[in-house]
Amino acid sequence: MYVDSPPVTSDLDEAVSVFVRYRARLFGIAYRVLGSVAEAEDVVQEVWLRWQKTDRSVVVSPVAFLSSATTRMAINVAQSARMRRETYIGPWLPEPVDTGADPEVGAQRAEALELALLLVLERLSPVERAVYVLREAFDYAYPEIAEMLGLSVVNVRKIVSRARRHLADGQRESVAAAEHRRLLHAFVSAARTGDVASLETLLTADAVSLSDGNGLRGCARIPVLGRARIARMSTYPRLWREAGPRWVDANGLTGVVIHQADRPTAFMTIAASEAGIHQVMWVFNPRKITAFLDSRLRCASVPGIASAGG
């Protein structure tokens, strides 16, 4: 179905049009598999380059071709990324993406987009993660996924079933978006004022706090466990001194970017169930914060298209 050939330039405008039409979907697939904005952008760029060089006259379904290429490349990147993350200093968190400025990132379906779920997805192998994302987030049929990844339909069904069971062990029923926003606002308000007692009432007894700093000085290099310890840590004066929280829409839910002296110093969000906040996620890694702030510009242009003819 998919054949590579020397570049065909006569229908380049149509190629650009098709690629732009599906670009948000391609980014959504790559991002969910990789948990990285930068890596997902690189995958989409590589798919665009391949799309230019493909004999598109023999492609039966452009969206199937592009989705398949994106998924396969994302799996390859994820396999090498897993080795790199073994040397990461401290907890690793997925890069948040701004879905307020670019709601199309989650426009297909919201599944497998929340930061907490992306973190749980890291427990799966890259192939398992890709299969789960295609099925649960984008509603591809089992035969379509099998063709995309060169697997049997039976194998795809087994992978999805196994992934669902595996993820169920690490997931809790999430609160609605409005309640998530209320809890996050209450958490930030109490943390800024040093109200440890109020923070403890918001947290579950088994709550965990993860700080992604990749060795940045002052960041906890191990998960912080328990409501009392998390509450004390979250009121650290240096974190909130002259800080201005800016509310954002991150991965389909509310998050907050903390600015000090007009410089972004941290991103934070939570995962919560009806019992309360059970996970606090802090991103201090400057590269990831920058990637989040830049993600709102993601659809302003399509990488490489301006020079597609050259």
Image (cartoon, rainbow, N blue to C red):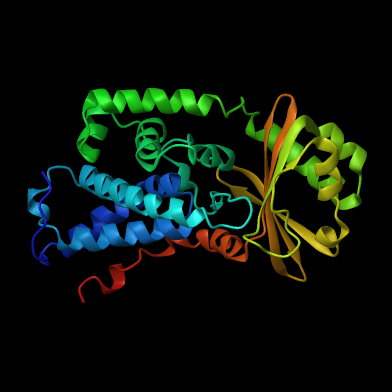
- Mark count: 0
* Residue 171 located left or right of residue 61: right
* Residue 215 located left or right of residue 35: right
Near-viewer residue (249 or 130): 130
Residue 231 in the image, given as x and y percentages of width and height: 84, 43
Residue 106 seen from this side: yes
Q: Is residue 185 above or below residue 6?
A: above
Residue 233 in the image, given as x and y percentages of width and height: 82, 49
* Residue 149 located left or right of residue 205: left
Q: Residue at x 73, y 58 (%)?
A: 219
Q: Residue at x 29, y 67 (%)?
A: 305
* Outermost bottom residue: 310
Q: Quadrant of residue 292?
A: bottom right
Residue 264 in the image, given as x and y percentages of width and height: 69, 65
Near-viewer residue (253 or 283): 283
Q: Residue at x 29, y 61 (%)?
A: 46
Q: Quadrant of the image for the N terminus?
A: top left
Residue 66 in the image, given as x and y percentages of width and height: 25, 49
Q: Is residue 50 above or below residue 185?
A: below
